[in-house]
Image: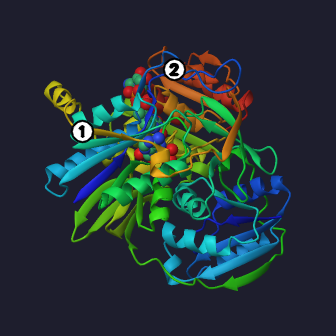
Amino acid sequence: MTTLVIAEHTNSELLPSTLNTVAAAKFLGNDIHVLVAGHNADSVAEAAAKVEGVAKVIAVNDEKLEHALAENVANLTVELAEGYSHILAPATTFGKNFMPRVAAKLDVQMISDIVSVESDDTFKRPVYAGNAIATVQSADNVKVVTVRATAFDAVAAEGGSADVDSKTLSSGFEKSSFVGQELTESERPELTGAKVIISGGRGMQSGENFHMLEEIADKLGAAVGASRAAVDAGFVPNDYQVGQTGKIVAPELYIAVGISGAIQHLAGMKDSKVIVAINKDEEAPIFQVADYGLVADLFKVLPELKEAL
Amino acid sequence: MKILVAVKRVIDYNVKVRVKADNTGVETANVKMSMNPFCEIAVEEAVRLKEQGVASEIIVASIGPQQSQETLRTALALGADRAILVKTDEEVQPLAVSKILKELVNKESPDMVILGKQTIDGDNNQTGQMLSALLDWPQGTFASKVVVEDGKVNVTREIDGGLETVALQLPAVVTTDLRLNEPRFASLPNIMKAKKKTLDETTPDELGVDISPRVKTLKVESPPAREAGIKVESVDELVEKLKNEAKVI
Ligand SMILES: Cc1cc2nc3c(=O)[nH]c(=O)nc-3n(C[C@H](O)[C@H](O)[C@H](O)COP(=O)(O)OP(=O)(O)OC[C@H]3O[C@@H](n4cnc5c(N)ncnc54)[C@H](O)[C@@H]3O)c2cc1C
Ligand SMILES: Nc1ncnc2c1ncn2[C@@H]1O[C@H](COP(=O)(O)O)[C@@H](O)[C@H]1O
């Protein structure tokens, strides 16, 4: 049995979510192949070949794969699927976008967002915003699975020496095309990989006030996140959102500032190692999961915190 | 242009979901049910496209038990024109849902299908993509903006790095993200009017779709509980604890 992992990358860099997905694949005990589908992405294929535990890399370079349109990545994966018992990708917006297409074309019921591998056909996954954990068993021939990155410690990026096998994309999907993107530029670490995260909620009152969080983030080498309410209010861009329907994070330290702690927010951060909550309402549900709670006005204590660090 | 919207009845997002003592599932007895929030956004978007003169007819469909009628009536009150209930008391997994929706698409020939990106019960985030694959249609998932022009739709998508825009030839599948719109509330007169709108019923059998589950749920458990910690009195105490007790800074 062999597992195919679909790599997430930027055409120049292999993204860490791929290392977490390979980690999940290792629990299956099969040989692991990695598909790098991109455009001018040779450096990514080389990087994937060095990843610990990878037996083979399949590199497919084509202009049509540059923006990882779901239709193209899925069709390619389906073409390559024969002989694989498991197909895995990270449960990021990349994996969520194309993997269900792969499953549908293979007539398989996909399993989303696993947090553990129990056996070659049985997995655990959160449901109801993480209020319950379901153990599910697949009866399909091929298992099509997305992996929650925070639940699996990344494998080493170095140490492997897999062969790279180049293949070509047979045809592109004509009915969709990439128009453009607006990526959030930041010097700070990426949210899902950050060791420390400081997030703001509606209590921050404005986008300008997020500077107070950014200053602290810079002192801690932290990423900045937000609740849905802060994103909806336009304080920060959508990719800051942590939660059930945003990003799932599990840093060493998560500091929630002016966030009430709605279940949908907790779903995205309650696996953090240490949680700090700063909120002026001592009844706020966030305190039920916080290791250290500070009942205070954030406008008073954030400047103090900046000084104290 | 005709739009098909898929809506699911789920446990209301405000309910604190509890796992059953026998670990077979979650408590659903006497629990408030509502339309999945992402489906509400899907209905709202279709209604806005109709108000803009882009769409001419909105059909809503739901697959589920008899009570899903209520969810469909809500969609009709929000502005959908007619509804289809595909009735079953069985669990229907996303692959089967998408096969049923494909049959409805074949019957109704919509130019666009709008779905939620995710149901908040199963948290699958699969159905729209699967439907689009089965139809071999283009897809625009996690939409925060939808613009229809000249036989195509431009969809701005919420992705991990920010936003991305794709252009899709119609017919296409779109799935909604939170920022696409803010759903309206149904007015009383519209709720009354909705009672008179057509609601047809069919079954997976009649549509020729096998819905037997492929994935079996062996067990449903509560997640490991997180103990509430302590309250600190000051920033200094907090920083001291983070340094010396938790050792995370
Ligand atoms: C389908 C669906 C999906 C969702 N997905 C997500 C998701 O992925 N992520 C997410 O975060 N939410 C999500 N939500 C929204 C969620 O239910 C909450 O509405 C949201 O998390 C609330 O954000 P908040 O805590 O910032 O705002 P509020 O609940 O308004 O809380 C603001 C907090 O700030 C405190 N505060 C105010 N002023 C100060 C001050 N000066 N000093 C200190 N504290 C102060 C208040 O006491 C309050 O506790 C989702 C909802 C739905 C329906
Ligand atoms: N039983 C159902 N009936 C109608 N629509 C559904 C059903 N299940 C899922 N959907 C649609 O598919 C979307 C995504 O669901 P899921 O893939 O289950 O997360 C939902 O927001 C609905 O639009």
Instruction: Mark yes or no: residue A200 visible.
Output: no
Towards the viewer: A202 or A309 = A202
Dot 2: what SS? helix
Towards the viewer: B8 or A206 = B8
Q: In which quarter of the image is residue A200?
A: top left
Rendered location of residue B125, percent (x, y): 51, 48
Residue A156, placed above or below residue A47: above
Towards the viewer: B88 or B227 = B88
Residue A287, placed above or below residue B51: above
Q: In this view, does A71 lie to the left or right of B155?
A: right
Dot 1: what SS? loop
Instruction: Find the residue positioned furthest to the front.
Output: B206
Badge 2 density bin: few <14, some 14–19, many ≥20, Cα 10 Å: some
State how the image is colored. Answer: rainbow
Distance CA(mark 1)–CA(mark 2): 44 Å
Using the image, tell me which numbered label, if any, was put on residue B198.
Answer: 1
- At a point 56% along the width and 72% down the height, the residue shown is A75
* Amino acid type, residue under disc 2 in the picture: Pro
* Amino acid type, residue under disc 1 in the picture: Thr
Q: Is residue A172 left or right of residue A111?
A: left
Q: In this view, does A142 lie to the left or right of A67?
A: right
Using the image, tell me which numbered label, if any, was put on residue A24.
Answer: none
Q: Mark 2 points at which residue?
A: A285
Rendered location of residue B145, percent (x, y): 30, 55
Chain under label 2?
A
Dividing the image into 4 quarters, which one contains the C terminus of chain A?
top right
